[in-house]
Amino acid sequence: MNTRVPKKNPRPPFLYFFLFMSGFAGLGYEIVWTRTLSVGLGHEIVAVLAVVGAFFCGMSLGAWSLDSRVSRSSRPGRWYAVLESGIGLWSLILIFFMPSANRLAAALISADPSVFRHWSVAFILPFLLLLPATFAMGATLPAMERLFSRMRRDGWSVGGLYAANTFGAVAGVLMTTFLIAPALGFRATAGLLAVVNFLCAAGVAVGPARREAERLPVSAGDGIEPGSRRIMWSLFLTGLLGIGYEVLAVRVASQVLENTVYSFAGLLSVYLVGTAAGAAVYQSVIPRGRFETVLTRLLQSLAFFCLVGVAMLPFAERIVSSLRNIMGEGLSGAIAGEVGLAASILLLPTMAMGATFSHLAQGARRSSGGVGRALSINTLGASVAPLVFGVFLLPAMGSKLCLVLSSLGYLLLIPERRWKLWLPAVIPLGFSAWLLIHPTGFQFITLMPGSRVVEHTEGVMAAVSVLEDSRNDYYLKVNNKFMMGGTASAFSDRRQGHIPLLLHPRPETALFLGLGTGATLSASADHPHLVAHGVELVPEVIRVLPYFEKATGPLDDPDRFRLHVADARRFVNTWRGSFDVIVADLFHPARDGAGFLYTVEHFQAIRALMNPGGVFCQWLPLHQMGLDVLRTIIRTFLHVFPDGKGVLATNSLQTPIIGLISSNGDRLYPADYIERRAADGRLRRRLASIRLHNTYTLFGSFIAGPGDLLCFAGKGPLNTDDHPVVIYQAPEFAYAANEPPYVRLLAFLDHLHPLPHQILQEAETDAEKVVHDRLSAYWAARNKFLRTGVGVNRTESVEGMLRQVRDPLLSIVRESPDFEAAYNPLLAMAERLHPINPETARRLLFELEDANPARQDARKLRESLGRGKWAKEACPGAF
């Protein structure tokens, strides 16, 4: 056999490029596949961790199984080319299989699965589905390491190759998240990544792999036998502790971050950059000293750097705000702040992690393999870390103690027993003691003046807080970012429940997607014979519902309320029944994953759950989205529900809420509909308390028919599972310094021209024509009322407020006697003004009587005050 090394071969460093591109494709696939599978498996922590675990386990299995075979082969380059080709080919096949896999997942999981069933399906299905690709991914690094070693004639290459692969992964995360997926969608992105795999395979096959069998193998040099329990346990536990630290640190930081798709990409990129940099430093700087001594120093440094990152967490808010001030407002400044925070807590630890893994893998390298097994064991530890730390330890011990113990865990792996080498470990030990004793916690809760924290839970998915203000009202916060309502906002929340329920003539079953404080769901209690199902993603939210019973009443009656802890998307896909009314809550579109609740496929699944004549209402938080996102969602909604109409939940300028409603057909209502629908006395009284008790208050919330909505939405892309443009559009608004919400509300209303026949049946009698005319006047008065409120200075005294709004509100009352929102504030001002200026108060009440003679409230108040307080003003001795 000719063992001469060929004279013409690509320089070995050229192989770094192929491994870089392989890492690029690998992390791109992980993002595409995990997001695509979440449609069927859900966004519960069970599904998220199971999919990631399945991905890692497939890689681990491939690295372990093929390590020895690839390492012993005289053609490792050919192995690499075949593996890359297999990854690309299976990726193309998955493009067609993924939709069917999601349907199968929904069928297997069911709506209310046991924990075991949910874990099993969420792990086994992705594991088997992705296995051909992940199995091959796991063996690419060992194949490239053996090819590189043969070409370079040196076995010291693990750190450099691992660094190149991981730097490629960084590029894959950033390019896929910021450029490729937003532009092309997930299927096209997967196809493009497959092309990258094929190019890597072809590049190696026609270059470095040519005549590779003629190259001599390279001896392993000094190393530890692959069967050594010590090195195997070290690899497993460093993988476990490394990902565990990341899970905990990110969980704490999520209370400060916006938690968008870009937040996730920034955090992951910093983690990978640190790991790659550490591997590169190990390859080029760290001397080839005694294995145990080098490992001891690396583990001590790793423990110390992790504790430094832990110590930075209490300053997370300051770090983010400082960097945003430096970089400016907008997307770039916000991302810089989030990346800066990630770097402060992750960069040094991950550099030490990258160097430590490279050292362990280099030490495991033998002539018969070892690098693949090292990667396999380390990846296996990483795959179970989210479950161990995120699901079990975090809720039981709290984030602070978990982070400190995970950092100190590295010290237990130190192989040296000489006290001089152990001496530096005193530093992290002392540091950890200080962190545990120090009172600083990892709770980031922004309090209003006079408020306090009643309960705070570090849940598996989010930190949930219940706050109480000085008026004894309770508020719900999730991750300190999302105010989920409270007892003081029950007026708006209950209207969001009642409006869609009232638009169905006799609902018997209703589904509420998203609970918050439960106020919207509680509206169903006022409708006789109605059974309501509520779905909430965060289990801790359901546990704190009793705090809000002042506004909701008890929600523990199983005959009326059935609560489910589930991802809304998965629940809709798996529920086997149907509903008369479906209400979707205010899903913040910028929150990572929420964009999938506004897709064509999700709306189609909801339509399939609706009974004939059913009503669906999708509430939209206009104060949390820009008009471009609103247009996309409306366009997508009308694609599935072409009869869609628009409603306004309240007349709020600060938190405007838009509702998109479909009646599963173009349903029109008689002029006296609400009088018949709310014949029950109790229901009518409850509706009066939230201003929905007559034709004008109910249908006065109507703002647009399908034509106006379609004209406003215009042409553009739909939000789909394959191309979820909302998750990429919405963060730009969340990160920017935006105009006040009322600017968007008024701009939206300017496009709309509602007509009575779009919501009411054609007027055939004179009485019905009068109702149509009064409703039109109500809408005009509502729009004027909203514009009047824009310039009002609410910090003024009562007299100052009256000077601002007196004339415009009286004009609105004259235009629409039915529009109570203009009448009631003037009535309240008169009562408050009377003790300090009775003459002005009396004159205001006379003007109200004149503006709306049909309503008697102003006259009754005037007479009441005249008999009581005003009479006493004339006779001070009566006090």
Image: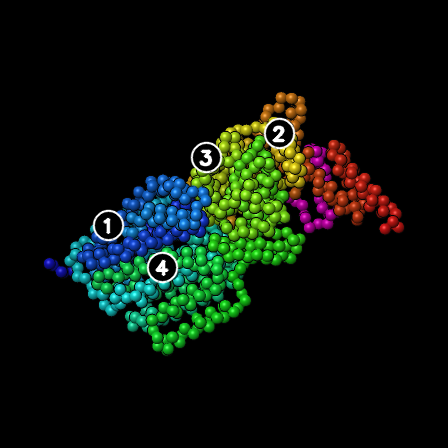
What amino acid does circle 3 point to? Ala
Residue numbers of the magenta segment: 790-817
Residue 18 in view here = no
Q: Residue at x 81, y 43 (%)?
A: 865
Secondary structure beneath label 4:
helix
Residue 466 x %, y % = 58, 54
Question: Which mark, residue 82?
Answer: 1
Secondary structure beneath label 3:
helix
Question: Which mark, residue 52?
Answer: none
Q: Earlier in the sequence, mark 3 or mark 1?
A: 1
Real-space CA distance between mark 4 and mark 2, rounded to the nearest whole angstrom: 63 Å
Residue 570 x %, y % = 44, 43
The mark closer to the camera, 3 or 1, is 3
What amino acid does circle 2 point to? Tyr
Quarter of the image for residue 601 reads top left
**Is 556 colored magenta in this rendering?**
no
Question: Which mark, residue 673?
Answer: 2
Residue 364 x %, y % = 27, 64
What amino acid does circle 4 point to? Gly
Question: Which mark, residue 608?
Answer: 3
What amino acid does circle 1 point to? Val
* Classed neighbour count for the residue bearing mark 1: other residues with Cα under 10 Å, few (<14), some (14–19), many (≥20): some
Q: Residue at x 21, y 51 (%)?
A: 206
Judged left or right of residue 381, residue 712 is right
Q: Residue at x 34, y 58 (%)?
A: 379
Q: Earlier in the sequence, mark 4 or mark 3?
A: 4
Judged by its main secondary structure, the magenta piece is: helix
Secondary structure beneath label 1:
helix
Secondary structure beneath label 2:
helix
